[in-house]
Image (cartoon, rainbow, N blue to C red):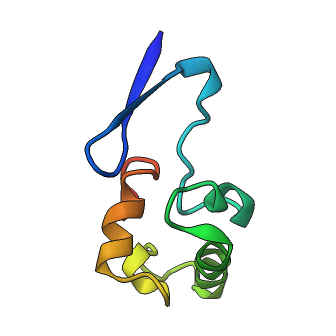
């Protein structure tokens, strides 16, 4: 089985499903897992994890736009690579 992923610029990449890792969940992923998302990099991945740890359990879910250094353009590019429901 093959899975197609849409890349920036409208290109498509195909890889066997077994070789493609599942998309990271914004609520649980480590900085290392988030670094693998195109457009995040080490600094933004660490900022995401830091923002998640600073939130109280009763706070609303973390959105990408809540993280310093992630604006609307970055949010749109990164959201496609995260698990469904992540914003």
In the rendered view, would you say 22 is above or below 60?
Answer: above
Q: Position of residue 40 (x, y in %)?
A: 54, 68
Task: Work out which residue is located at the far left of the displayed protein and give it.
Answer: 10
In the rendered view, would you say 9 is above or below 31?
Answer: above
Q: Of residues 36 and 53, which is closer to you in this image? A: 36
Q: Position of residue 76 (x, y in %)?
A: 31, 65
Residue 61 sits in which quadrant?
A: bottom left
Can residue 33 be seen here? The reply is yes
Residue at 36% across / 52% down in the picture? 80
Q: How many discs mark residues in the rendered view?
A: 0
Q: Is residue 72 left or right of residue 22?
A: left
Residue at 49% across / 90% down in the picture? 68
Residue at 44% across / 81% down in the picture? 70
Q: Quadrant of the C terminus?
A: bottom left
Q: Of residues 50 and 57, which is closer to you in this image? A: 50
Q: Is residue 79 left or right of residue 50?
A: left
In the rendered view, would you say 54 is above or below 35?
Answer: below
Can residue 63 be seen here? The reply is no
Residue 77 sits in which quadrant?
A: bottom left
Q: Position of residue 69 (x, y in %)?
A: 49, 87
Residue 19 sits in which quadrant?
A: top right
Q: Of residues 2 and 60, which is closer to you in this image? A: 2
Q: Position of residue 50 (x, y in %)?
A: 66, 83
């Amino acid at each position: 089985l093959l899975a197609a992923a849409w890349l920036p610029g409208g290109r498509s990449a195909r890889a066997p499903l077994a070789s493609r890792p599942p998309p990271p969940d914004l609520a649980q992923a480590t900085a290392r897992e988030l670094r693998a998302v195109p457009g995040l990099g080490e600094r933004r991945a660490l900022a995401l994890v830091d923002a998640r740890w600073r939130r109280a359990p009763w706070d609303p879910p973390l959105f990408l736009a809540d993280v310093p250094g992630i604006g609307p353009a970055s949010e749109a590019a990164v959201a496609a690579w995260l698990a469904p429901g992540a914003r």
